[in-house]
Amino acid sequence: MKNRLYYQDPFLKTFEAAVEAVKAEGECLWVRLSQSAFYPEGGGQPGDWGQLAGADATYRVTDTQSDEKGQVWHRIKAEPGTAEPRPGDQLAGSLDWARRHDHMQQHTGEHILAFCVWKLAGGYVHGLHIGQTESSIDITMPEGQLRLPREKLKEIERLANEVIARDDPIRCYFPDADELKTLPLRKQPGQHEDTRVVLMGDYEGVACGGTHLTRTSQAGVVKILRDQSARGKLRLFFLCGLRAARHYQACYEALDQASSLLNTPLDQVPAALQDTLAKMNEQGTAINTLRRDLALSHLPALLAEARALPGGGRLVVAELTEAEAPALDALASALSEQDGVIALLSAPQGEMTLYTFARGEGEGADLSALMRQVGIRGGGRPHFARGAARDSQAHHQAAKLMA
């Protein structure tokens, strides 16, 4: 079946066709029809979903693919006990239109975005991926550039939405070989028996077999999300149409909630948040200082309770509270500065227990190896080691090994 109805009408939602062939691949059943409005996956656009209904059975279409001969196959799923379709059966097809229309908005928006990237940054788009939540394009930039400044991204986005607002016509068709040579295409098409082109207004043209809208305004809006480097190219993530509208709604709701929490107008949220974070940082520093002072206040009592070691020196084994955990290293260091003292300290943190083992520099026990010996994951130097474990008694096990 090469009669692809979406070539004539990309907005066709229903059609009728005869079954030409049925094949099984593993647990999947595929159907080829005499004609179809279902788009087979290609060019970064996913295959269509929908439904095929016969006289006695209804089948869900869960994927659409084309083979090496250009024949379109529909993967179908039926309820248990439903008879399989047979060649000659007449079926009524209906697309999952919300999904198809979304893909048309993303694909058309991508063409507009690609034109703007080429016009403003000199980049050539080589790949499109329409994902479930966001879309992306891979771009070869001049001089191997892998990122774009934020202002340039804003400029590209602004031009793309201006193009959408112009409401220019979009024409998708198969020109003959002579006409194809005269068209001002942004990229030269590959060698194909028939080349389908997509023209937008008088400024954008490229070969493409995907489904598209009929006017640029139907793409709604383009929103660039972010850019990143990927395999030697610039990858741009974006949303179009209803996806962009939903993204805007979610962002506005989040900003509105932040505005209420900070008790400030929407446009002043970033400044108010920056001020709040600065104050929190100051308070956090002050709190950590207090925690450190509190932990260090235990020093005299811990030294008084230190155990004598058989080979000389003293051993301090102690547990701090979770609030004192940030001061664990400071207390261990202070203890290790005392002549001959070895400190084995712990503090709970959530489901884990943090450990710091410390002694004075020079010859002595390898505390990093001792940690590993009792099952604490971590490490450090022989005289100062840190780690964590689910076992809250590991420092007592270490103390027994040193006794």
Image (spheres, rainbow, N blue to C red):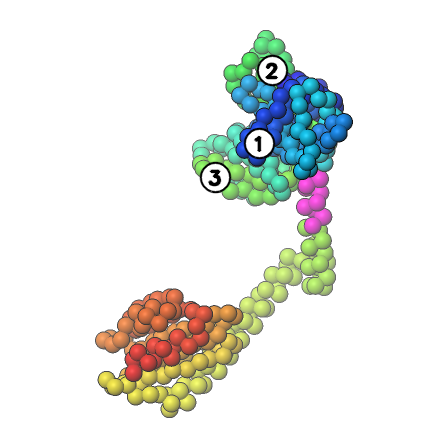
In front of the other: 304 or 15: 15
**What residue is rendered at 68% in x and 30% in y?**
83
| Residue labelled with disc 2 | 183
* Amino acid beneath label 1: Gly
Mark 1 Cα-neighbour bin, 10 Å: few <14, some 14–19, many ≥20: some
Residue with the mark numbered 3:
230
Residue 37 lies, in percent from the top left, at: 69, 24
Q: Nearer the viewer, mark 3 or mark 1?
A: 1
The mark that comes first in sequence, 3 or 2, is 2
Nearer the observer, 337 or 375:
375
Rendered residue at 55%/13% (across/down): 193
Q: Nearer the viewer, mark 1 or mark 2?
A: 1
Q: Quadrant of the N terminus?
A: top right
Q: According to the image, label 1 marks what residue?
A: 44
The magenta stretch spans which residues? 242-250
Q: Based on the displayed image, in which of its 4 quarters is residue 111 positioned?
A: top right
* Label 3 with label 2: CB-CB less than 8 Å: no
On the image, the x and y values in percent for residue 47 come to 62, 31
For the residues labelled 3 and 1, the Cα–Cα distance comes to: 16 Å
Query: Viewed as shown, does residue 21 lie left or right of 324?
Result: right
**Circle 1 — which element?**
loop
